[in-house]
Amino acid sequence: MQKIKTQWLGGLASIILLAASQLALADSREVVNESRSVSANEKIYIEVMSGEITISAAAGNTFSVSGKLDEKATGYEFDSKDGFSRFEMKMPRQVNYSAKDKTNMAELHIEVPIGSNVEFKGVNGNVSVSGIHGSSDIGTVNGQIVASDLRSSVKLSTVNGKMRVKDVAGKVELSSVNGKITDEGSMGRVSYEVVNGKVDANSQAEEVNISTVNGDATLTLNGTKTVKLSTVNGQVEAALRGVTNPQITGSSVSGDIELTLESIASVRVEVKASAGGSIDNKLSNDKATKAKYGPSRSLQFTLGSGDGSVELTTVSGDIKLEKR
C-alpha cells in the first residue's frame, strides 16, 4: 500500500513539473530589464503598441523598463542621450490579434523621474500612469487610461476606451471617442472633449471647457470661475458650487444645456433660443419672450449686483436654468 502511494505521489509530481514546463515554454515573450541614469527633467518618449503598461514616477533620476514584450514583438530599442530618452517595442508592420494572442501581449512596468516630461503612444493596450509632475502626453487607440497625481501639462487621449483620472492638476486636456471620461478632483484649467462618449466629472478647476458631439456630460464644479459649454446632438449638465459670480458661456445645436447655480448667485443672464429651441428659467421669475417674427425666444435678467455673467444660445435645443 505504501509503495502504491509513493508511486502515485511521484506521478503527480511529474505531472505538475510537466505542466509548469509547458507553461514556461508557452510564454515565449522576451524579458526586458533596462535602466539608465537620466536628468531630473528628462524628455522621455515611450512607444508600446500593445499590452498592459504601467508608468510611475519614482524618487531619483532613473529611467527603467522591466517586464515582458509582446509575443509578436521583434525586439526593442532603449536609448538615452543629452536629456532625451526613448523606449520603443518593435512590432511587425502588420499585426492581427486573436483572443488567444491577447493573453501574450506586453506586460511592462516603467519608472521615470518625478519631474520628467513623458510622451506615450500605444494602439491596443491599457495604460496606468501616476506621479509625474513634469508633463504627461498619453495616447492610446483601443485601450483604457487610468491616471492619478499628474501635474503641470497633462494631455490624455483615447479612441475606443475609457478614461479615469484622479487628482490631476495644471493645464489638463482629456479627450475620448467612443469612450467615457471619469474625472475626480481635477484642478487648474481643464478641458473635456468627447465624440459619441460621456463625461462624468467632479472638478475643482478654476476654468472648465467642455465640448461634446453626440455625447453627454455631467459636471459638478466646485469653485469654478470660468466655464465654456458646447454640445452638438448631446446634453450637458453643469452644477456650480462655491462661487457666486462665475463667467459662463455656452452653445448647443440640437442639444440641451442644463445649468445649476448657487441661489445667491450674482450674475447677468442672457439666453437666446432659435429654430424651435426652448428656455426654462427657474433662477428667477423672469420669463422668456417670443420674437415677433420667427420661432425664436430670448431672456435677459440680473441676479444680485450682476458681478458674473451667463450667456447661452441654442439652435433646436433646450436650455434650463436651475438654482441649488
Image (cartoon, rainbow, N blue to C red):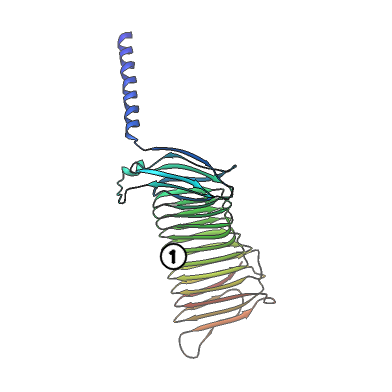
Q: Residue 102 at x, y = what percent?
A: 34, 44
Q: Is residue 88 toward the left or the right of residue 267 in the image?
A: left
Quadrant in which residue 180 is drawn? bottom left
Q: Residues within 10 Å of mark 1 (few under 14, many from 20)?
A: many
Front residue of 282 and 103: 103
Residue shown at 53% from the left, 59% from the top: 201
Residue shown at 30% from the left, 18% from the top: 11
Hey, which residue is sitting farthest front in the picture? 82
Q: Is residue 228 toward the left or the right of residue 162 in the image?
A: right
Which SS class for mark 1? loop
Quarter of the rendering occupied by the N terminus: top left
Q: Mark 1 = which residue?
A: 215
Q: Is residue 166 above or below residue 247?
A: above
Front residue of 174 and 138: 138
Q: Residue 242 at x, y = what percent?
A: 65, 63
Q: Is residue 48 above or below residue 2?
A: below
Front residue of 244 and 106: 106
